[in-house]
Amino acid sequence: MSVLVDLFAVLPQRRPVEDDDLWAAGFGPALAAFEAGVRARYTEGTLLRLLDSPDPRARRASALALGLTAAPAVVPAVAGALHDDDKQVRRFAADALWELWFRGGTDAQNARLRRAASEPDAAKAKAALDALAREALEFAEVLNQRAIWHFKRGDYARAALDCEATLQLNPHHYGAAAGLGQCQLKLNRPRAALRAFRRALAINPDLDLYDTVRALEALDGE
């Protein structure tokens, strides 16, 4: 058993009847210890090789570790793990991608994006996202977060434009593809919505979109 699997095995496993808050309280410190152990022992290249291990435990641990420690350049490899035959690998890969997407800029830009995404003042959040979008032209998650901002306020056309721009920069962004589908539904464009939802499922087959796709296919006569 590899050291990575040993480190991963120490993490508390969620039990079906366990309270989420209690589980999270125990998981946080353990996750920090896991990350420290990974950083001390593993390179990004080794973690990428372990992502293709025949042992699903190693693949799970690698997906989690890459989300915690890797640079955004690993996104295509981690996105490939969304098609793993192990459900837990797919779950860890899906979560890891969000962590990687939020690290798409400089350290300072990443911190600013997290603040903007959690800013309760809508005007301040929008101003911060606009400023980042002008400054960090390749930072796809900035545009995705701005799409979410627009969507929440009913501006579905602008949200769709930001989803499309996100996907141009990051074609692995299943969240932006699914979001684009939701925007197209709101704009009464069912065929465009169907295309977007199919794209999202092609990236991440575990998304809960199959009923929606079937309904749109029936509406379209496919």
Image (tube, rainbow, N blue to C red):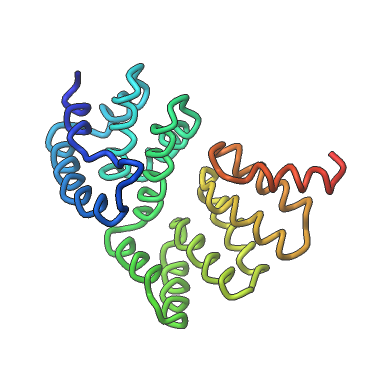
Please identify the quadrant where the C terminus is shown: top right
* Quarter of the rendering containing residue 106: bottom left
Please identify the quadrant where the N terminus is shown: top left
Total label count? 0
Q: Position of residue 9 (x, y in %)?
A: 21, 31
150 sits left or right of 156 in the view: left
Query: In this picture, is 96 found above or below 134?
Result: above
**Which residue is more in the foreground, 136 or 32?**
32
Q: Position of residue 125 (x, y in %)?
A: 43, 76
Tell me which residue sits at (34%, 65%) in the image: 114
* Quarter of the rendering containing residue 95: top left
Residue at the farthest right position? 221
Tell me which residue sits at (48%, 64%) in the image: 145
Q: Position of residue 85 (x, y in %)?
A: 47, 24
34 sits left or right of 51 in the view: left
* Quarter of the rendering containing residue 171: top right
**Which residue is more in the foreground, 151 or 86?**
86
185 sits left or right of 88 in the view: right
**Which residue is more in the foreground, 151 or 218?**
218
Q: Position of residue 5 (x, y in %)?
A: 22, 27
Tell me which residue sits at (19%, 49%) in the image: 26
Residue at the farthest front position? 17
